[in-house]
Amino acid sequence: MIKETIEKLERGEVSARELVAHYQNEIKKKDPELNAYREVFSAEGGSASGGDDPFKTAEEIDKKIKHGDTPRALEGIPFAIKDNILVKGKLAGASSKILEGYTASYDATVIKRLRDEGAIFLGRTNCDEFAMGSSTENSAYGATKNSHDISRVPGGSSGGSAVAVASDMAAAALGSDTGGSIRQPAAFCGVVGLKPTYGAVSRSGLIAMASSLDQIGPITKSVEDAEIIFDVIKGRDELDATNLEAKLPSGSPTSLKTIGVPREYFSLAEMGKNGLDDSVAKKMHEAIDVLKKNGFEIKEVSLPSVDYSLAAYYIVMPAEVSANLSRFDGVRYGTREEGKNLFDVYTKTRAKGFGAEVRRRIILGAYVLSAGYYDAYYARAQKVRYLIRKDFENAFKDVDVLLTPTSPHPAFKIGEKTSDPLSMYLEDIYTVPINLAGLPAISVPFGSVEKDGKNLPIGLQLIAPWFEEKRLFEVGKILELAK
Ligand code: GLN
């Protein structure tokens, strides 16, 4: 936990150098099997990247502490960073072959902010290629394994970051979330994952997937840690035009009274549409009891358009993907295949550099944006998006926070869904509507269930109105404490 660690640093019970050594040791022991890291900065055997060295940063921090300087918000805290967030001087690849050899020439705004508050960077973590997936199996560098059961996926796309935190190979991590990529892996790995309000955290230096949906957020061991990190990374950045000055939260600790449970999420389950696992439904009921005991009123709410979320997402997202990924052409970034002419270079580089899932989405995106289909697909999906946003707006007239499962079931087996993209897309049924509406949401671990003799964590999702992250932390801490 961040606060306790900083207190220990201050009291001289541990040094930042020892913290880095501890995590590097854990990585050396566990990561050959788990494959959470793409690169460990300045690990034994040398680092492929230049840029900062965690031991050097740690030594500077130790000197400051000895000198009696007041510790900053993240003084000496070792972080794992998803491979799609730029750290100056380090390789950055979004776990794609097409970016092999690409070195970041600047820090993402979030990295700058963490650095300014004393964070240390341990390495970059594995993810689905360009953050497209729900299992980290789409990485061009092999799947990451769930530390609770290595025959299962850690979720995705920020699977490496979630495993790094869950198995104590980092104190905290950053991930990115376009349709669930922070929350779902956090749920599968038994850690906390926050997707901030769209516009609360700068996207400058994030390798874009779908720009109107992407947000960077923390993956942590506790709700309090997520809150500390969010407070550091949020706020106005002129490098991101969609970024807003996060408004002060209006919900004071005593004013939260009602929790909404969306009827459709359960009726979908009853109709067998999303296959809500009994074990997860049971946890939902337990959580409702906990919240009732804590004085909250539980209300059923209706989100009638939410049923169309996945369909709208799989039009809007690929459309933006096809535009964003057009810059990877063999000329400007990463690898290049030689060809007869420029067009040949483009097509050969892209055919070889992108994996199957990325190609599938680029093709789908180009199709829904093409003349004649634009109105039928893209424009329509945008209208549905507006309706979904309205549904949430209405729901929040009656309740302060919404409670849902994060995923319909616990972590699934490696290879179970790879041959059926549609079943993989259904993974995101509870998380995607939040990105379409731009809302903040957190996944909080809420115990575990036993499957094949292993304890698999379950995560529950809390959703708040725009810029009301404080509500998520407040209710999140209650759920966390109950388990
Ligand atoms: N699993 C979703 C997808 O494949 C979400 C990914 C994400 O949030 N980056 O698109």
Image (tube, helix red, strand yellow):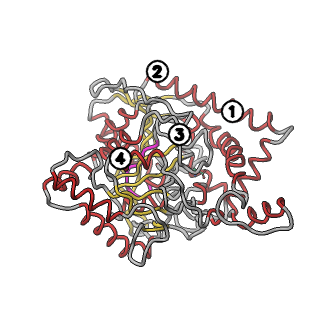
- Residue annotated with mark 3: 265
Mark 4 residue element: helix
Q: Nearer the viewer, residue 466 or 346?
A: 346
Amino acid on which disc 3 is placed = Tyr
Residue 256 seen in the current view? yes
Side of 256 where 461 appears, left or right: right
Label 4 or label 2, whichever comes before in sequence order: 4
**Would you say the residues marked 4 and 2 are in contact, meaning their CB atoms lie under 8 Å apart?**
no
Residue 449 seen in the current view? no
- Residue 473, disc: none
Would you call the spot at circle 4 few (<14 residues within 10 Å), some (14-19), or many (20 or more)?
Answer: some
Label 1 or label 4, whichever comes before in sequence order: 4
Q: At which x and y percent is residue 188?
A: 44, 57
Label 2 or label 1, whichever comes before in sequence order: 1
- Distance, label 3 to label 1, CA atoms, is 22 Å
Label 3 or label 4, whichever comes before in sequence order: 4
- Distance, label 1 to label 4, CA atoms, is 38 Å
- Residue annotated with mark 1: 382
Instruction: Tell us which disc is closer to us: 2 or 3.
Output: 2
- Residue annotated with mark 4: 116
- Residue 397, disc: 2
